[in-house]
Image (cartoon, coloured by chain):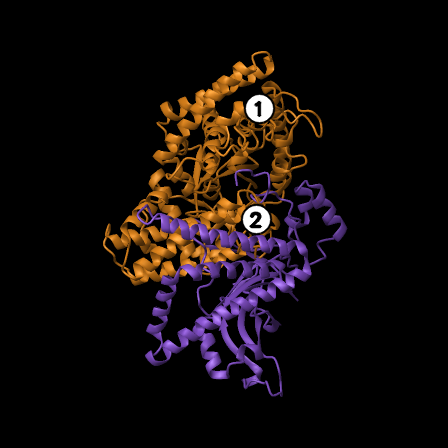
Amino acid sequence: MPRKKANNLENTEKEIKKAEVISEKTSTKKEAKSKLEKKTATKSTSKKSSSNTKKEVTKKISTKATKTTKKSATRSKKSASEKASLKKSTTRKSKTKEESVKDNVNVEILEYYDLPYRYNQTVVKVLAQTPTTLFIYWDISDSDRANFVEQYGEEFFNNTKPVLVIHNNTMHYSFEIEIDDFANSWYLHVNDANCNYTVELGRRAKYYNEENSIDLPNNYLYLTSSNAIDAPNDHVLLDKNLKTVYFMDTRTNIITEEDITSVSFFRNIGKIYNLYDLHSDFNKNNWLNSNHWQLDFKNPSSGNPSSTFK
Amino acid sequence: MKKNPKGYVSFVLHAHLPFVHHPENDTYLEEQWLFEAISETYIPLLLNFEKLEKENVDFRITMSMTPPLLNMLDNKLLQDRYIKYLKTHIELAKKEVDRNSENINLKNLAQYYVDRYTNDLHVFKDIYKCNIITGFKHFQDIGVLEIITCGATHGYFPILYINEKTIRAQIAVGVQTYEKYFGRKPRGIWLPECGYVPESDKYLREFGIQYIITETHGILYANPIPIYGTFAPIVSPNGVVAFGRDMESSRQVWSSINGYPGDYNYREFYRDIGYDAPYDYIKPYIACNGARVPTGIKYYRITGKDCPKDYYNIQWAWDSINKQAGHFFDSRQAQISEASKFTKNPPIVLCPYDAELYGHWWYEGPDWLYTLFKKIYYDKCDFDLITPSEYIDKYPQMQVSTPCRSSWGANGYSEVWLNQTNDYVHRHLHIAGDRMVELANLYPNEPKDSLRSNALNQCARELLLAQSSDWLFIITNGTMVDYAKKRIKDHIGRFTKLYFQIKDDKIDSEFLKKIENYDCIFPEIDYKIYK
């Protein structure tokens, strides 16, 4: 089942607000971008589409903002107040920035950067956070949005919902999850570690056989596919049928075959690793007969809070 | 070295700090990470190596020195600022001698700090001529220390590799930086955060890297099952040798409950005159905004749990060092004699740690290493110290198996560098990586030192700096978060600005000059590695 992290909503909202602030001031960048768009599109339609998309974006931002604040207000007071303060701080920031720009016309260039709100690309990417948790992020470019509206009508985005199709390319199965137009990333639990996954971004018709229905083959529209990712392995690959292993001489690169009658090391690991918790693991689970033995990660590491440098 | 030992112990210390360099002003506390590490870890390690060399004790140790650390140690401004840091500390310690003239314990400890910082200044300025890299190089050249490299800016491969060119560049620049400072090629690499993906194998081989270090399950979960566990290295089908961390020894040192650094006689890290001394007195020596921060002068020992802290006693600390070196020695002796019954070659027990654990966090750590190495050299035992390279040369036959995708972060995979607090960063890193590759292919042959090629090189620097795993780690960890977020914004911001300037053929040379001065890492970088 998809596990959506609460933060996603807040993040997108923060970013939207940032985007508002940016869009107010950095009109030059926008122009540059629309120039680029113009280059790719034909002359006659480009003017129309670019103005259209601009409208659409600003509309969306405002509706998104109000919707999300409503939601969060019912969820908890605290987050609402946090957001209020966030609003304040962003407006304050924008003011001071404008002032400083005015004051320092001839002074050294002031550096202040915000991360771009989005890159206006149709994209979906997948990363493996753990052996069974994928992180997926996506976006649909303005020009693609405009094309869909042109092709399927003004109500396209209202009458379809975004979905991710997860393909397990190792075990050859796929499943679909519904996502949310307000999110731009998602954490997804998968059942099988040590498999290759790709993710497809698409839209599924919301209404079937009704007046609002959209004419899509199989009620589905493919948008784009992700990179392939290998989810890590999460257990000892104990193979009782393993009869031979290969050895390489790293000086000569010559490979030799060796028979192993028993995996003596693993049979004795409890004795060799003089660790209480490992001992108890072995005794309790009779691990040699289980085929899913996992280590207990108590190994401290750079993730250890004791590392005070970072 | 011993004849026919039953097994080997291999210490690997990972020395790394993110590139922090602020010529614009000297109020960034983050620059002190370097100065504290030099005084508490790097110089103490050098002094202990020197002691062992003088006493003719043969020992072996491996250290990764990351490219950002090397660039900072070689930076004139940071060298000057370190000298200033030392002079301020000597001044403060002298004041402490006066302030504590009534209390003989504190007075002696204050005098100890006067001597210690004064000696640091002497070692840094007079012996190493402000560049301690030469010190480490010396010990590599006489054969007791093996230095390995790391990713250019400690970029975390399991997340970056969806654009493979970006990990190729991390490896290439890591190797180039190493060659510049050590005059030879590195045989091994510390993968940033031990983050391993098999996709990096071909690039490791391309740049001549022979071996990597992985977390325990990098070996134990490998495919097919490695029949000797972490007691023998494995070799991937592409020819990269992987050594895995030994669980037992790392727990002995690291455990927060009964690990060595928690001994009651050791110096207490959290009590510092930066917090304890009267405010007006200490104000010139803490943060310039008046916030109390640690100064490095600490008077107390850990003493116990929930009890008043007792004064630090150097002799008592030495007693614990000796006791614990003995414990470690006996544990390895027992472990190796048991493990050697099951392995074809003498087993190797690999002990990787953050170098800064030794000295900065565990103040007595460098002295503990010295004591242990001496013990291994003089006492009767069945094992010896070794470096991974020596082990490969001695026992070149190893099982073919692909290490498991893994890291040494909490829970063993990518959660530390990819979670709700920092996941917003990755799309920016990926896009910037794609754009860098795009630029390199768009301008494949810019003449050296032309404005455009300078801008392209600076783009590469900004991208690499944005990719440091440190920023993601800091955000997860919740301390100094604002600084880490600012660094990501600055590097992505500068990169993006330059990217558009290059593509629009409107490079602002003033702006370029300014950020070349700020982000001056890798002066010899060539953007063409992204082609």
Nearest the camera: B445 or A149?
A: A149
**Which hue belongs to chain A?**
purple
Q: Amino acid at mark 1?
A: Ala
SS at mark 1 in the image: loop
**Which hue belongs to chain B?**
orange
Label disc, if present, on residue B476 of the rendered structure: 2
B252 relative position to B472: left or right: right
Assign the C terminus of chain B to one quadrant of the image.
Answer: bottom left
Residue at x 46%, y 63% (from the top left corner) = A118
SS at mark 2 in the image: helix
Residue A128 image offset from top left, x and y in percent: 56, 59
Q: Is residue B40 above or below residue A204?
A: above
Residue B148 image offset from top left, x and y in percent: 43, 41
Nearest the camera: B387 or A157?
A: A157
Q: Amino acid at mark 2?
A: Thr
> Which residue lies under the disc numbered 1?
B277
Instruction: For marks 1 and 2, give the CA distance.
Output: 32 Å
Q: Is residue A192 visible?
A: no
